[in-house]
Amino acid sequence: MSNEKAQHDESVEFEQPCPIRDVLDRIGDQWSLLVLEALEIQTLRFNELAREIGDISKQMLSRTLKRLEQDGFILRTIYPEVPPRVEYQLTDLGRSFLVPMQTLIIWADSNHHAICNARVNYAISGK
Amino acid sequence: MSNEKAQHDESVEFEQPCPIRDVLDRIGDQWSLLVLEALEIQTLRFNELAREIGDISKQMLSRTLKRLEQDGFILRTIYPEVPPRVEYQLTDLGRSFLVPMQTLIIWADSNHHAICNARVNYAISGK
DNA sequence: CGGCATCCTATCCGATACTG
DNA sequence: CAGTATCGGATAGGATGCCG
């Protein structure tokens, strides 16, 4: 197989035209927010995170952590021991990001019933 | 055609286990937020929205609008005229949603440079 | 233990053509 | 004008295996 182009190019796009897209891409994916919230409580190791989140694959946890590290939301610390130990913790940037996110989460909790309601109404009347 | 299963099942999931997922799914996709922000300024028709957003396909605009309507973020009004006229506007729910979103957008603007910085540093040192 | 490479699937999304 | 139907390429994400 002439693997000119890897299936997953892990390189980073530096210049998004729209700043908000960077943020949306990070919280839009399935796992980033879960990881950040787990790390808000305490510093965690790779497998601890996996257990904490529950149903994430190692693949996705690995990618999610790498992206969050690249974007400066989390800090990755390697302890040169055997067996190897790697700890993840929030950076100041990551912590500050969770502040506006909290207001959004609160809104989501408060209005979830309204959304569900709208869906039911739509299904009854419209469809 | 024995269309047992449509290629795209447009049916709605009513019960998300996690409320925030509903919101994240809506703002995580490429277009919903752009549509909401366009409608924040004024009520718009289908093709007006398409022009306003610029590079969205009719396909995606149609699906995005339908989901936003299902979830109660926007209101769709059909005027029985020829040629047909359909107007979209924010509901109270949609408008209230944009409030917490604003704080997130402001955060994104303020911290975009920090994210870009982190990426450059990561590329230089890590990779 | 941490985590990348591989394979595979489901879904996203654009382009286009067609309908009322 | 306001969409829907269909096709096809790109991408996200899960399962698994290997390796330091």
Image: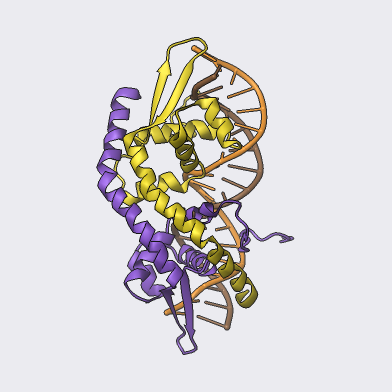
Chain colours: A purple, B yellow, C orange, D brown
For residue B91, side relative to residue B120 (left or right)? left
B7, B96: nearer the viewer: B96
* Left or right of residue D2, residue A37 in this image: left
Left/right placement of residue B112 relative to residue B104 reads: right
Give the residue at x 60% y 63%. A10
Q: Is residue B17 visible?
A: no
Q: Residue at x 64, y 74 (%)?
A: B124
| Nearer to us in this view, D15 or A125 | A125
From the viewer's perspective, is residue A87 above or below residue A50?
Answer: below
Q: In the rendering, at what x and y percent does residue A106 appear?
A: 29, 53
Instruction: Specify whether residue B125 is in view.
Output: yes
* Coordinates of residue A87 in the picture (x, y in percent): 43, 79
Which residue shows up at 41% across the image and 75% down it? Answer: A89
Q: Position of residue B19 (x, y in %)?
A: 30, 49
Q: Residue furthest bottom?
A: A81
Which residue does the image show at 46% across and 10% down from the upper left?
B81
Vertical placement of residue B85 versus A56, above or below: above
Q: How many marks?
A: 0
- From this view, report whether residue B11 is shown above or below residue B19: above
Figure quadrant of the C terminus of chain B: bottom right
* As drawn, A38 above or below B3: below
Q: Picture quarter containing residue B98? A: top left
Q: Nearer the viewer, residue B28 or A53?
A: B28
